[in-house]
């Protein structure tokens, strides 16, 4: 399984959107770094406020890694963009995290 590390880049944890750096080491030892933004609206929609933003980002990367190779994940994106490529994303993540 891939190793995922998440670092909050926005100094203010209440910033909207929040920005994260995500490091991924794939099963084939491919290393990639990504910048991801998450709006409060997206966070609330997917987690209901029940999980941390970091948990949402990690679950989102796990979702992506089940569907594509590490190097195929965009380097800079907003979490809301995942839905455009994978229509099942919001349903899967919200059912997983909003419990």
Image (spheres, rainbow, N blue to C red):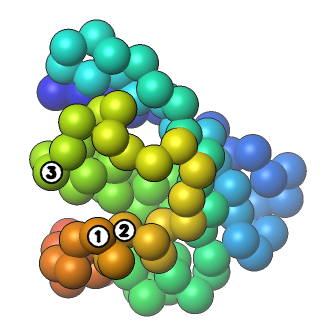
Instruction: Give the number of the mark in front: 2 or 1.
Output: 1
Residue extending furthest toward the right: 11
**Quadrant of the frame with the N terminus:** top left
Whether pointer 1 and pointer 3 mark residues with C-beta atoms closer than 8 Å, the reply is no
Residue 4 visible within the image: yes
* Circle 1: element type: helix
Residue at image coords 32%, 41%: 72
Task: Looking at this view, name the residue that lies furthest to the top.
Answer: 29
Provide the residue designation for mark 1.
85
N-terminal-most mark, 2 or 3: 3
Q: In this rendering, does residue 99 appear at all?
A: no
Q: Position of residue 53 (x, y in %)?
A: 53, 62
* Residue carrying label 2: 82
Residue 95's disc number: none
Spatial distance from mark 2 to mark 1, Cα to Cα?
Answer: 5 Å
From the viewer's perspective, is residue 32 above or below residue 91?
Answer: above
- The image position of residue 46, as x and y in percent, is 38, 80
Image quadrant for the C terminus?
bottom left
Residue 93, located in which quarter of the rendered image? bottom left
On the image, numbered disc 3 is attached to which residue? Answer: 67
For the residues bearing labels 2 and 1, Cβ distance under 8 angstroms: yes
The CA distance from mark 1 to mark 3 is 10 Å
In this picture, is 22 found above or below 29? below
Pointer 2: residues within 10 angstroms few (<14), some, or many (20+)?
Answer: some
For marks 1 and 3, the one nearer the N-term is: 3
Return the x and y of residue 28 as percentages of the image width and height: 20, 14
Of the two numbered discs 1 and 3 in the rendering, the one whose residue sits closer to the viewer: 1
In space, the residues marked 2 and 3 are separated at their CA atoms by 11 Å
Question: SS class of the residue under badge 2?
Answer: helix
Residue 83's place in the image compared with 79, above or below, is below
């Amino acid at each position: 399984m891939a190793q995922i590390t998440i670092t909050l880049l926005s100094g203010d944890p209440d910033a909207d959107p929040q920005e994260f750096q995500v490091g991924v080491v794939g099963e084939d030892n491919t290393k990639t770094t990504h910048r991801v933004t998450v709006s409060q609206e997206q966070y609330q929609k997917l987690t209901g406020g029940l999980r941390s933003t970091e948990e949402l980002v990690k679950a989102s990367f796990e979702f992506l890694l089940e569907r594509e190779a590490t190097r195929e994940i965009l380097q800079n994106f907003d979490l809301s963009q995942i839905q455009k490529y994978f229509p099942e994303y919001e349903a899967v993540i919200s059912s997983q995290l909003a419990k």
